[in-house]
């Protein structure tokens, strides 16, 4: 007797296709907040295409109808605003960091199931396709409750499209565990909205200035012409992040709670760069996040240092 492909059963396992065989399949990753998992999606797609081919005599039509009912009900109205991409399982190409192009392919897969026509997938050029050059990535976390600190380390072994990799995971971090909703006791929330600050001590190249001038100029909040230091309050997009990592020895990226207002930046301008440690100490005192990027010989490393203060109960 011909069997339903395993990767279909892993996602739609029982007679009603409602439960899960394991907690690593595509459906579970999406539902449980892990994000869109490219590796598991390709497994599910291949399994469903095999099922379409097996259904040439409509032997599995009842089971396909049950799968379609479940998929259409849950996923056909899927929106890129609902989910995010799992950093550890995303592809390398710039365009492949876009969730909307994943959803487009998924919807065509559903149509292929509805019409029993695999050519809707195989004969259509999709922007979202498997990337055979996917690099190795690592993510690790260290939580120190006694000092109210947390360090998240991201690593990739490729310099290609590194800004997109790191930004995808930074967005995931704030999506799944935003600074305003830290649940590890007894840490209190970093204030919202979350503003990032870019400190520069060297002028970017002319080409880069032209690219982001319109974005940076309105964001200037402090400046010391004598030292050539400028601080901007910025949205964390690919242009800003690329500027930061283009010269991590001269640029600093951080987030800080502004309990004392913008006057705290005067202290930074006075001490920087002679006393660079003071910037990180101020972030520790005020609460915030310090970015530390390193371009090593065989890998790119980004450390995010989170600092909180002890929660004080109101009386």
Image (cartoon, rainbow, N blue to C red):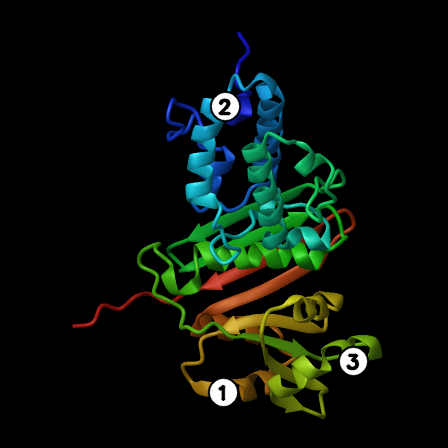
| Left or right position of 245 against 308 | right
Identify residue for label 2.
61
- On the image, the x and y values in percent for residue 251 come to 69, 73
**Of helix, strand and loop, which one carries label 3?**
helix
Q: How many neighbours does mark 2 have within 10 angstroms: few (below 14), some (14-19), or many (20 or more)?
A: some
* Residue beneath disc 1: 262
Total numbered badges shown on the rendered structure: 3
Crowd around label 1: few <14 · some 14–19 · many ≥20 (10 Å):
few
Residue situated furthest right in the rendering: 206
Between marks 2 and 1 in the image, the one whose residue lies nearer the viewer: 2
Quarter where residue 226 is shown:
bottom right
Where residue 275 sits: x, y (%)?
A: 62, 77
* Residue lying at 41% horizontally and 42% vertically, measured from the top left: 73
Reading the image, the residue beneath label 3 is 210
Residue furthest left in the image:
315
Secondary structure of residue under mark 1:
helix
Q: Residues within 10 Å of mark 3 (few under 14, many from 20)?
A: few
> For the residues marked 3 and 2, what is the alpha-carbon distance in whole angstroms?
58 Å
Q: Is residue 32 visible?
A: no
């Amino acid at each position: 007797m011909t069997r339903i492909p395993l990767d279909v059963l892993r996602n739609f396992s029982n007679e009603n296709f409602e439960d899960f065989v394991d907690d690593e399949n595509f459906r579970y990753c999406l539902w449980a907040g892990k994000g869109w998992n490219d590796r598991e999606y390709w497994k599910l797609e291949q399994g469903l295409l095999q099922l379409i081919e097996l259904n040439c005599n409509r032997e599995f039509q009842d089971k396909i109808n049950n799968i379609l009912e479940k998929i259409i009900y849950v996923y056909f109205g899927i929106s890129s605003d609902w989910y995010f991409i799992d950093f550890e399982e995303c592809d390398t190409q710039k365009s492949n960091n876009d969730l909307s192009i994943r959803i487009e392919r998924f919807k065509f897969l559903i149509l292929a199931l509805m019409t029993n026509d695999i050519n809707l997938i195989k004969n259509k050029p999709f922007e979202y396709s498997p990337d055979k050059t996917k690099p190795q990535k690592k993510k690790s976390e260290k939580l120190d409750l006694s000092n109210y600190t947390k360090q998240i380390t991201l690593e990739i072994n490729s310099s290609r499209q590194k800004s997109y990799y790191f930004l995808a995971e930074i967005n995931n971090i704030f999506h799944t565990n935003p600074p305003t909703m830290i649940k590890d006791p007894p840490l209190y929330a970093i204030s919202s909205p979350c503003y990032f600050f870019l400190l520069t001590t060297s002028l970017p190249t002319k080409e880069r200035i032209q690219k982001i001038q319109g974005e940076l100029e309105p964001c200037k909040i402090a400046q010391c012409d004598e030292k050539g230091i400028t601080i901007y309050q910025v949205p964390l997009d690919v242009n800003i992040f690329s500027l930061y990592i283009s010269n991590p020895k001269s640029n600093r990226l951080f987030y800080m709670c502004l309990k004392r207002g913008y006057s705290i930046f005067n202290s930074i301008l006075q001490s920087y760069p002679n006393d660079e440690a003071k910037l990180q100490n101020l972030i520790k005192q005020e609460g915030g996040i310090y970015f530390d990027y390193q371009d090593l010989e065989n890998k790119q490393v980004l450390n995010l240092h989170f600092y909180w203060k002890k929660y004080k109960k109101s009386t």
